[in-house]
Image (spheres, grey):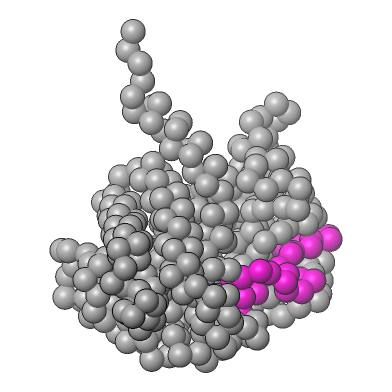
Amino acid sequence: MSRLAQTHGLTDIQQEILSTVRDFVDKEIVPVATELEHRDEYPTQIVEGLKELGLFGLMIPEEYGGLGESLLTYALCVEEIARGWMSVSGIINTHFIVAYMLKQHGTQEQKDTFLPRMALGEVRGAFSMSEPALGSDVSAITSKGVRDGDEYILNGQKMWLTNGGTSNLVAVLCRSDEGHPEGTARHKSMTTFLVEKEPGFGEVRPGLTIPGKIDKMGYKGVDTTELIMDGLRIPANRVLGGTTGRGFYQMMDGVEVGRVNVAARGCGVAQRAFELGVSYAQQRHTFGKPIAQHQGIQFKLAEMATKVEAAHAMMVNAARKKDSGERNDLEAGMAKYLASEYCKEVVEDAFRIHGGYGFSKEYEIERLYREAPMLLIGEGTAEIQKMIIGRRLLEEYRFQG
């Protein structure tokens, strides 16, 4: 167990869960991650292991068959998993966000239907806000749900669905003008629809097509897809919470905890990059001694370790604030922003320590170097985080003059 990124005040149960996850990561993920990533292969065996550990139900209440754990426990588990392979943490994250949205906002029937099977990993979640033309401007979505008797007809194109192919439940954000007069604020005329589908690619149910995996620079193994709705019929009882017009708030609540998750991923990847850098620096010799004994490398290691420690502390603070029932959008935005930026910097420093070998696919740091940039844009770009942080700071420090 490393000296860095320790979390004080954990219960015995939390420590036991983390120890179990850490062992699983070291034995089942680290040895195979780079090989699977280079083949862009879905980690089926790893996912089955995570099901057995109960991680798909980590934050689902015990009454629905989950472990009923806190956001902090979940984030610390994600940190460990991302240390092994960030793509695996992505498989869990979208599932977790949908389960969280159901727990917080779903009708009793929706909770009873989905949460027990989600806790077992039998139902796997994905969520969909983004569209090809809008990026981070969620209020500009054009996908639409129109009421037709006891059903809604959904049309539109969605983009960047993590687990788009392997999931069988997708929370989809659409515009729905039913009951919302002309001139209603755009974010108040959005609805989250719970779309059930078969796993796979092509037409996975009438009116719903998952074209195929998007080929990415990094973040491989996990499937990232489009979603095309063309006359997709959804029963009215699959409106999340049973009421239209609440979709934007529901999604933002999910993304808020998702940002803590992204911060945790950044912490995990940065930890692994530091481990690789500090290990290689003690093995590689130049000018008659290990490069770790050169002051220039020691300075890099010092900076890297400090960034790992700082990012972890901010992530833990954001998770604990949410667990306490307080608003945490400021802390989550800060944690996500700092952890993703520091992750990129720590990975690059580890890459530089490796010298030419960092450019070789034989070395794990090459994979991390391609994975880190995703954290700069996932769950809202760094620029979006800074906008959120800035607005919240102006609320807190309003000029009294």
**Percent of width and height locating residue 121:** 50, 80
Q: Is residue 230 visible?
A: yes
At which x and y percent is residue 129?
A: 64, 53
User: Considering depth in this image, is 396 or 235 the residue closer to the camera?
Assistant: 396
Does residue 70 appear anywhere in the picture?
Answer: no
Which of these two is toward me, 101 or 24?
Answer: 24
How far across and down, in percent of the image, does residue 330 sit?
39, 41
Which residue: 67% across, 48% down?
135
Expressed as whole percent of the image width and height from the top left, the position of residue 95 reads: 52, 69
Instruction: Determine the image quadrant of residue 30.
Output: bottom left
The magenta-colored residue range is 210-235
Q: Going by the image, does 98 lie left or right of 213?
A: left
Q: Establish if 212 lies above or below 146.
A: below
Residue at 58% over, 68% down: 370
Q: Is residue 222 magenta?
A: yes
Question: Which quadrant would the N terminus be assigned to in this image?
Answer: bottom left
